[in-house]
Image (cartoon, rainbow, N blue to C red):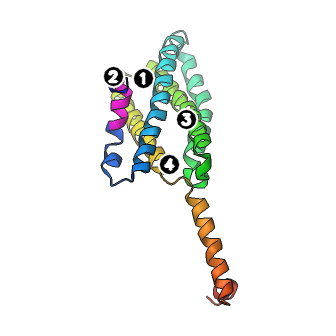
Amino acid sequence: MKKLDPFYWYLILAHRQLLKADLHPEERTFVFTNINKHRVAQWINLFAAVIIFFALQSVPRADMGTVISALLAPVMVMGGAWFALSFGAIPARLIDCSMSVTLWMYTGFKVSLTTMFLALGFITPPLLWIVFTVIYLAMDFSSTVYDTADGLKAGLDEAILKHSRAALIYYNSQGIRVEDENSSS
């Protein structure tokens, strides 16, 4: 079924450089799992976009600016939170939970952004639609690949913390005081 899904091929294209990288089998599995997560978001966004398009047709042109302004908050908050959330800070054992959270954060961000772009389409000249399309596709390509690349760091902070603690134990056993090293510099 995936082979017939246009969003699958779109996301494979977006992730082509990452898929060409020398990934370990578990990393490659994660990449495809995350691609599937983004397929869900793409389909939800498409269905929402159809509804939004027809709903926006009944909004007076003068009120379209209000619609766009009202969407700035969810785009900024959801987009900012989604980008700020790093898989590296998530313990590896909680990856399923973080996949679900990032799916819905990204979906909220993308549907809000799609609504803004559609609203802009109703009040701007068609020549600008090309520019908006480039901006939209660049955002979509980069954000999905960023999310996937970030996901490859899952559990990194946990591993760094574990190694840092082990190093401190070793230093203490050798009589090396880290505080002394820091205060002399």
Distance Cα–Cα, label 2 vs label 4: 26 Å
The residue singled out by tag 1 in the image is 124
- Work out whether mark 3 precedes mark 1 in sequence or the reverse, and give the earlier one: 3
Task: Using the rendered image of the protein, determine whether residue 76 is visible from the camera's viewpoint.
Answer: no
Q: What kind of secondary structure does the magenta stretch mostly adopt? A: helix
> Which span is picked out in magenta?
4-12
Q: Are marks 1 and 4 in contact (CB under 8 Å)?
A: no
Label 3 element class: helix
Instruction: Give neighbour class at mark 3: few <14, some 14-19, many 20+ (Cα, 10 Å).
Output: many
Q: Residue furthest top?
A: 58
Crowding at mark 2 (Cα within 10 Å: few <14, some 14-19, many 20+): few
The amino acid marked with disc number 4 is Gly
Q: CA distance from mark 1 to mark 4?
A: 37 Å
Contact check, label 3 and label 1, Cβ < 8 Å: no
Percent coordinates x, y for residue 178 in the rendering: 66, 83
Mark 4 = which residue? 151
Which residue is more in the foreground, 158 or 104? 158
Q: Is residue 64 magenta?
A: no
Q: Disc 3 designates what residue?
A: 103
| First of labels 4, 3 by sequence position | 3
The residue under the point 49% across, 28% down is: 40
